Image (spheres, grey):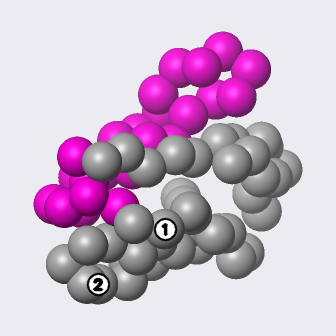
Amino acid sequence: MAFRANDGKTYAVFCDYNGDMHLFDPRTGKDLDVISLGRNIESSPAVYNDMIVVGSYTPKIYGVRIK
């Protein structure tokens, strides 16, 4: 999923079955950051302001602020 952050830049995010959230540059495909949430992600990411929100299998909901 691609989105424009409050800093004016465009980012993309995807989550994988291993529980990793990848923030990457959609133009180059290069990972900018990877965060391990511990378990597989069961939901599509949603973005609100500069927060990425996902749900996991644990069951937990995570909010990760983009800085």
The residue most toward the bottom is 60
**In the image, which is nearer the foreground, mark 1 or mark 2?**
1
Residue 40 point in image, percent of width and height? 26, 58
Marks 1,2: beta carbons within 8 A: no
| Image location (x, y in percent) of residue 65 | 50, 69
Question: Whole-Å distance between the Cαs marked 1 and 2?
Answer: 11 Å
Q: Which amino acid does label 1 sit on?
A: Ser
Give the residue number, with chain letter if any, for mark 2. Answer: 60
Which one is in front, 46 or 7?
Answer: 46
Pick the residue in front: 67 or 30. 30
Residue in view at x 74 percent, y 20 percent: 27
**Which region of the structure is painted magenta?**
18-41
* 12 w.r.t. 48: above or below: above
Q: Mark 1 points at which residue?
A: 43
Residue depicted at x 44% and y 42%: 22
Magenta stretch: includes residue 46: no
Q: Is residue 40 left or right of residue 48?
A: left
Determine which quarter of the picture holds residue 51: bottom right
Using the image, tell me which numbered label, if any, was put on residue 64.
none
The local crowd at label 1, few if under 14, some if 14 to 19, many if 20 or more residues have their Cα within 10 Å, is: few
Q: In this view, does 11 lie to the left or right of 36?
A: right
Q: Can residue 34 be seen in this view?
A: yes
The front one of 23 and 6 is 23
Q: Is residue 37 left or right of residue 27?
A: left
